[in-house]
Image (cartoon, grey):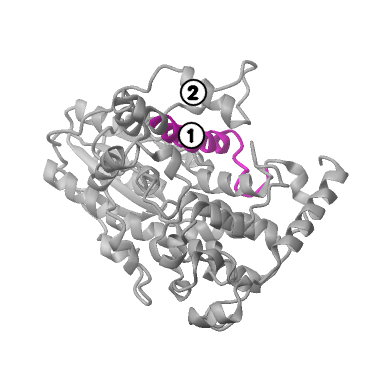
């Protein structure tokens, strides 16, 4: 029997536009698909992402079986499992898509250094539009500011056309020692907090394709106007599909560009691709500055006087701050594993500036509760809001949760969906219910502090406190 070649699936849980799989098939050797759940500290995804991973792997396994191959599942240390699989199967090659997170890059080099010389090592790019080494300033340095970065990307040749999914895969006939997906216990049981996920998401490659096609048909035209409105279905919701590699950014790029020809859709298409560029920018930053998950990009923020307030952190996590737009976002997050991007910024600003709680606490909570918990985007977003990241919002930009709510959820539809106890309060008072009169609250069936909490802090006072804290580190100068 011809020795097989291994296709090691990682953040590329799809068959279409998969260069590693495509090149492996060209060898005409039997294909042995492998996925290894890395259980070492720092690798295991958060709880919501584990839910998604379970269903995405189930979808991938079914797709492979229909094409003629069987997915081999293992958990533990990838290097040890890959060496074992190569030894027991006699595999002659290892094909996989590269990742850009610091620990994943170390893992790739570790595996390469342990492979014997008679096993071919093939690493492919598919998770980004442009490789980090190819986008740089005129001086050859990585970009620190988004707009010139994105301009440089747009000057590059278009990403290559996506590859078609294989019609058939000649699978390796004797894969042994596979785990059962159910035994990994990726799904919550007691309690099962994922009930709301099933009404919102369809993990897997088919769900990703349906998502981009539906967005182009129904959302792209008004995207530039609607993307900041949590009360409207104005965003693509592709982030978890992109994170798990169920669709590639170049698939998205080419589908959007193919539907950009009409002037009416061009503005929305360009605005959407720009957001895809922010994903790219965050990944490039993490590649060049691998300490970002633990260190502020702006080093003077190492001395920022953060507060350690567990009670306030819990109130924020549970959506009980008394600020409706913040609480609605946190409850949406818990119920669906996702939060609208505009609301993410408002909720993050409230944590780091109103409450002065370290951005890493927020990043950790999002990492555990988001189905799209991408390390680069999550860290990049939190550092941006906190004012300590690359191209960050100025620290003195403190989101006012009342004004933000009134501007982006003017009728209160989003708030009333996620905070039903406020559903009878008129829109005029909804974003600051503490300003409503006693009769107005009584008529709405709301008792302040009982049905819905009073504000845990005064925003105006907290804004002043945050600016004073920033002034302290600013006066010290860069470290």
Label 2, on which residue? 153
Whether residues under marks 2 and 1 lie with C-beta atoms below 8 angstroms apart, the answer is: yes
- 10 Å neighbourhood of mark 1: few (<14), some, or many (≥20)? many
Image coordinates of residue 245 in percent, x first then y, are 35, 42
- Find out whether residue 285 is within the magenta segment: yes
Is 401 above or below relative to 108?
A: below
Residue 188 placement: quadrant: bottom left
Secondary structure of the residue carrying tag 1 is helix
Q: Which residues are magenta?
A: 269-296
Label 1, on which residue? 280
Image coordinates of residue 406 in percent, x first then y, are 55, 56
Front position in the image: 12 or 413: 413
- Find out whether residue 270 is within the magenta segment: yes
Front position in the image: 145 or 179: 145
Is 313 above or below relative to 218?
A: below
Front position in the image: 388 or 222: 222
């Amino acid at each position: 029997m011809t020795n097989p070649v291994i296709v090691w699936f990682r953040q590329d849980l799809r068959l279409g536009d998969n260069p590693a799989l495509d090149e492996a098939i060209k060898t005409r050797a039997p294909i042995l698909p492998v996925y290894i759940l890395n259980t070492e500290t720092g690798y295991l995804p958060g709880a919501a992402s584990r839910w998604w991973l379970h269903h995405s792997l189930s979808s991938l396994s079914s797709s492979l079986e229909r094409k003629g191959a069987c997915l081999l599942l293992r958990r533990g240390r990838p290097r040890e499992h890959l060496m074992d699989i190569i030894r027991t199967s006699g595999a002659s090659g290892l094909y996989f898509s590269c990742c850009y997170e610091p620990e994943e890059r170390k893992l790739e080099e570790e595996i390469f250094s342990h492979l014997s010389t008679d096993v071919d090592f093939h690493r492919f790019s598919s998770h980004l539009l442009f490789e980090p080494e190819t986008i740089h300033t005129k001086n050859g340095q990585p970009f620190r500011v988004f707009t010139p970065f994105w301009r440089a990307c747009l000057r590059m040749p278009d990403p290559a056309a996506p590859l078609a999914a294989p019609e058939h895969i000649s699978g390796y006939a004797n894969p042994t020692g596979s785990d059962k997906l159910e035994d990994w216990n990726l799904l919550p049981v007691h309690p099962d907090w994922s009930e709301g996920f099933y009404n919102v998401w369809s993990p897997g490659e088919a769900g990703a394709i349906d998502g981009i096609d539906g967005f182009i048909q129904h959302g792209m035209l008004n995207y530039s106007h609607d993307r900041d409105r949590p009360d409207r279905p104005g965003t693509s919701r592709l982030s978890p599909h992109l994170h798990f590699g169920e669709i590639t950014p170049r698939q998205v790029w080419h589908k959007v560009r193919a539907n950009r020809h009409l002037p009416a859709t061009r503005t929305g298409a360009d605005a959407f691709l720009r957001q895809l560029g922010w994903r790219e920018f965050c990944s490039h930053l993490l590649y060049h500055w691998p300490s970002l998950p633990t260190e502020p990009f702006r080093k003077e923020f190492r001395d920022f006087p953060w507060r350690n307030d567990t009670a306030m952190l819990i109130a924020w996590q549970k959506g009980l701050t008394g600020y409706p737009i913040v609480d609605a976002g946190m409850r949406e997050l818990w119920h669906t594993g996702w939060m609208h991007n505009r609301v993410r910024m408002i909720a993050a600003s409230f944590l780091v500036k109103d409450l002065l709680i370290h951005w890493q606490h927020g990043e950790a909570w999002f990492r555990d509760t988001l189905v799209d918990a991408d390390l680069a985007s999550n860290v990049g977003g939190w550092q941006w809001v906190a004012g300590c990241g690359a191209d960050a919002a100025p620290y003195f930009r403190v989101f006012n949760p009342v004004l933000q709510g009134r501007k982006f959820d003017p009728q209160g539809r989003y708030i009333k969906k996620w905070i039903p106890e406020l559903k009878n309060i008129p829109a005029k008072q909804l974003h600051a219910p503490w300003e409503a009169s006693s009769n107005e609250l009584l008529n709405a069936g709301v008792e302040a502090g009982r049905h819905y909490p009073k504000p845990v802090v005064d925003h105006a006072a907290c804004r002043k406190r945050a600016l004073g804290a920033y002034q302290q580190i600013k006066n010290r100068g860069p470290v």
